[in-house]
Amino acid sequence: MKALLLAAGVGQRLRPLTDTLPKCLMPIAARPLLDFWLEALDRAGVDSILINTHHHAGLVRKYLEGHAIQRKVTLVHEDALLNTGGTLLRNRKFFADETILMIHADNLCLGDLKEFMRAHKRRPAKAEMTMMVYETDSPSTCGIVVLDEQKIVRGFHEKEPDPPGTLANAAVYLLEPSIFRILESVGSEAIDFSTQVLPQLVGRIFTWRNQVYHRDIGSPEALEKAQREYLALMRNGKAGGSLAPLAVQVREMYERIAT
């Protein structure tokens, strides 16, 4: 299986932290976020990983130099952002006719990717893709999904002030080659997956629930929360210890990678 790790975003909500580092290299327990994903993909048996870059592309490249699974990684640079769907379509040849694991790399996810893959293989015949979902504590900032009894998506509520539930799209997907037919039908180079693709697939998206841990780190508050929650998980639920200010952590991570 091949994977697409989406790591090109500018990270406006994380500024000024993203003036120094891209979102995918933000520190979690002194590790770049991207390291969690690379380790998870390697553990899941993914053969090849495509990572798109744009903002601080040189730092992403530098980080990957000498990484244990560098041999599995191909970098593609985007001078102008193509959005999720556009990146996927632009790199269609890389994926050939295989199932694709597509991931937004600005999330801390501790779910079992092997279980996710097994769920995709068991999906109902009408489902063309499988979406990872999770219970969120901030539904108004997420894409909330409504499911039927077969765990098929029947509706989306994207960042609404009062959505009908707390089950959120984790921005981790397993896609079949049929996705390219839909991407081509959009007729655009830059394609927003959430608004231009997913609505076309309502009734054909199976879901798998991550019951371990998942959090979007797209704001300083969310990043700090993810750091504290991860440390608590590693300590078997025991909080404790102090974290350096985010700006200090980011500067230290930058110096480790850049030098």
Image (spheres, rainbow, N blue to C red):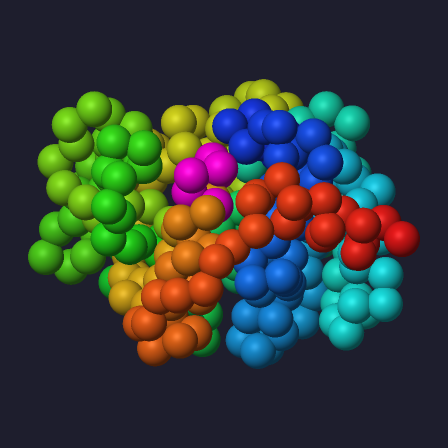
Q: Quadrant of the N terminus?
A: bottom right
Q: Residue furthest top?
A: 188
Q: Nearer the viewer, residue 182 or 46?
A: 46
Is 173 part of what is drawn in magenta?
Answer: no
* Highlighted magenta segment, given as a residue range: 218-223
Q: Is residue 66 above or below residue 184?
A: below
Left or right, 259 with respect to 109, comes to right
Residue 149 in view (yes/no): yes
Q: Would you say the magenta stretch is mainly helix, strand or loop?
A: helix
Q: Position of residue 203 (x, y in %)?
A: 23, 44
Image x and y of residue 239, in percent:
35, 66
Q: Residue at 57% across / 51% down in the picture?
A: 244
Is residue 54 depicted above or below 98 in this figure? above
> Foreground: 56 or 97?
56
Asked whether, in this view, residue 28 is left or right of residue 93, the answer is left
For this rendering, which residue is in front, 91 or 223? 223
- In the image, is residue 219 part of the stretch drawn in magenta? yes
Q: How many marks?
A: 0
Q: Residue at x 65, y 45 (%)?
A: 248
In which image quadrant can residue 59 be found?
A: top right
Image location (x, y in percent) of residue 141: 32, 33
